[in-house]
Image: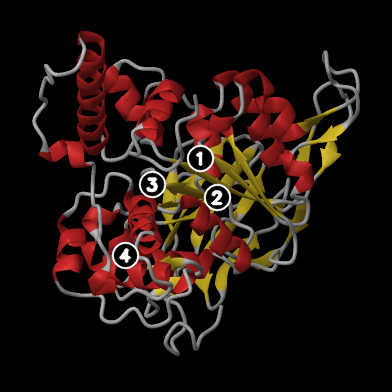
């Protein structure tokens, strides 16, 4: 990474732990430090494995400058990294090791307090002067140059795709393709075909071979969004693709090798989905080699001013004046259930209605939040019964949805469960009333 962009300081090393992600001792872990962590079947090993194919003193891992040193101690069945048997190698966070029938992954500790905040106030198209964002930047600085799989968790509109794009741009794969696959935007029955591709004749309408997202992303990065919308029966196939670095198109018996980095994202409590048995734990562990969470905008209100400045700059306004005063106070007071995406819509709308190409921030007429929240539901007796009923229903609908999405902190899946509505139908209603981006889809 660019040391100068980071304030002239090298990123602080991440604190990692070794996690067993499959094999007889799945779930065990050990913290990795400067002293070697012994891996083996011998009692007393720092990471003792109940695996008959693992030697008593099989291997060790320790922190060294530039990464983590893995040393095989003459084991019978060997230590493997990226399919090759190694004697000694320095690997980065996210590395997956194979010893016997057991797979291990080096995962950065989840506690962001253990990570020294970055000196930078932006990463890619993400802006933030707040401590939570600078800690997020510190993690992204570390993992961007690696091939580590990253799981990004955050509410709707926080910028999960921006994180994925920044990781891609900060990696050696930046010249390769960046492919976005949204599980929530594809019918369930087509997800496998869209993700892994299909061959001619695989199903009705398959008139030719079609590469899936993984193949199109070969040499680059595939961003799998709305991860928890993936059907449970398809999750083992994604797991196999991650482990084998190959995909099998629908209708084909021949796996196709792929070289991709995977960044996945969800806006739900994915660990809760695992506990509820709606998401496979082995796939979760494989995807969350590095697990980052983007804080919602309401918890980092000091970031609103720099984000507004970036939005105005992108709109071609080089000198909007100071981002301060009553207008900023109004933005800061809002709860932002739609997060940065909602903020961007507010600013873009105000600029479009300003009547000038270079408005000053202090002159913008900001319409923050649904105006109906400030009004009482009133019955207009001067209208016909049908017209009055339609107006009242629309007002109720908007007020209910605005409160629902705010209480659900922008989590549409949670809001749908609370309201007893289908998620796609709820998303359509939210768009209709301008509570999330997009127009009426009817």
Of pointers 3 and 1, the one earlier in the residue sequence: 3
Disc 2 versus disc 4: nearer the observer: 4
State the residue at coordinates (45%, 31%). Answer: 440
Disc 2 versus disc 3: nearer the observer: 3
Contact, mark 4 vs mark 3 (Cβ under 8 Å) = no
Residue density around tag 4, few if under 14, some if 14–19, many if 20 or more, within 10 Å: few
How far apart marks 1 and 4 lie (CA) works out to 21 Å
**Residue 222 screen position, x and y as percent:** 66, 48
Q: Is residue 240 left or right of residue 348?
A: right
Residue density around tag 1, few if under 14, some if 14–19, many if 20 or more, within 10 Å: some
Of pointers 1 and 4, the one earlier in the residue sequence: 4
How far apart marks 2 and 4 lie (CA) works out to 19 Å
Residue farthest front in this picture: 382
Disc 1 versus disc 2: nearer the observer: 1
Question: Does residue 50 appear in this view?
Answer: no
Of pointers 4 and 3, the one earlier in the residue sequence: 4
Of pointers 2 and 4, the one earlier in the residue sequence: 2
**Residue 346 screen position, x and y as percent:** 33, 55
Which residue corresponds to mark 1? 285
Residue placed most toward the observer, 171 or 321: 321
* Residue 386 occupies quadrant: top left
Q: Is residue 440 left or right of residue 236?
A: left
Task: Report helix, strand or loop for mark 4.
Answer: helix
State the residue at coordinates (54%, 43%). Answer: 287
Which residue corresponds to mark 3? 154
Q: Is residue 268 left or right of residue 54?
A: left
Which residue corresponds to mark 4? 114
Q: Is residue 350 above or below residue 359?
A: above
How far apart marks 2 and 3 lie (CA) works out to 23 Å
* Residue 377 occupies quadrant: top left
């Amino acid at each position: 990474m660019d040391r100068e962009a980071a304030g002239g300081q090298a990123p602080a090393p991440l604190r990692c732990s070794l996690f067993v992600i499959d094999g007889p001792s799945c779930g065990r872990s050990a913290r990795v430090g400067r002293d070697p962590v012994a891996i083996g079947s011998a009692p007393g090993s720092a990471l003792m494995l109940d695996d008959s194919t693992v030697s008593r003193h099989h291997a060790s891992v320790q922190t060294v400058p530039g990464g983590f040193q893995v040393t095989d101690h003459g084991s019978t069945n060997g230590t493997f990294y990226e399919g090759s048997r190694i004697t000694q190698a320095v690997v980065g966070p996210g590395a997956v090791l194979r010893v016997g029938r057991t797979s291990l992954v080096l995962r950065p500790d989840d506690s962001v307090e253990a990570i020294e905040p970055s000196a930078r106030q932006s990463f890619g198209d993400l802006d933030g002067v707040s401590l939570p964002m600078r800690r997020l930047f510190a993690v992204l600085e570390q993992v961007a140059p690696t091939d580590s799989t990253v799981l990004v968790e955050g509410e709707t509109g926080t910028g999960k795709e921006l994180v994925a794009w920044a990781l891609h741009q900060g990696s050696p794969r930046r010249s390769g393709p960046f492919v976005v696959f949204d599980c929530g935007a594809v019918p369930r029955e087509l997800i496998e075909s869209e993700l892994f591709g299909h061959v001619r004749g695989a199903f009705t309408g398959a008139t030719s071979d079609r590469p899936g997202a993984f193949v199109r992303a070969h040499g680059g990065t595939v961003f799998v969004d709305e991860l928890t919308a993936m059907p449970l029966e398809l999750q083992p196939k994604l797991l196999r693709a991650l482990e084998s670095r190959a995909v099998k198109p629908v209708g084909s018996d021949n796996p196709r090798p792929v070289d991709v980095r995977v960044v996945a994202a969800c806006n739900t409590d994915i660990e809760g989905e695992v506990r509820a048995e709606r998401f496979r734990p082995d796939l979760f562990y494989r995807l969350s080699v590095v697990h980052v969470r983007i804080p919602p905008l309401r918890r980092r209100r000091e970031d609103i001013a720099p984000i507004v400045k970036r939005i105005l700059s992108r709109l071609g306004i080089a000198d909007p004046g100071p981002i301060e005063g009553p207008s900023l106070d109004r933005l800061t007071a809002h709860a932002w259930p739609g997060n940065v995406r909602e903020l961007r819509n507010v600013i873009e709308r105000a600029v479009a209605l300003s009547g000038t190409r270079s408005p000053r921030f202090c002159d913008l007429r900001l319409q923050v939040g649904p105006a109906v929240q400030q009004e009482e539901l009133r019955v207009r007796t001067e209208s016909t019964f049908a017209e009055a009923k339609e107006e009242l229903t629309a007002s109720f609908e908007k007020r209910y949805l605005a409160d629902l999405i705010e209480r659900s902190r922008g989590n549409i899946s949670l809001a749908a469960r609370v309201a007893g509505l289908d998620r796609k139908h709820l998303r359509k209603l939210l768009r209709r009333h301008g509570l999330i981006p997009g127009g009426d889809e009817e």
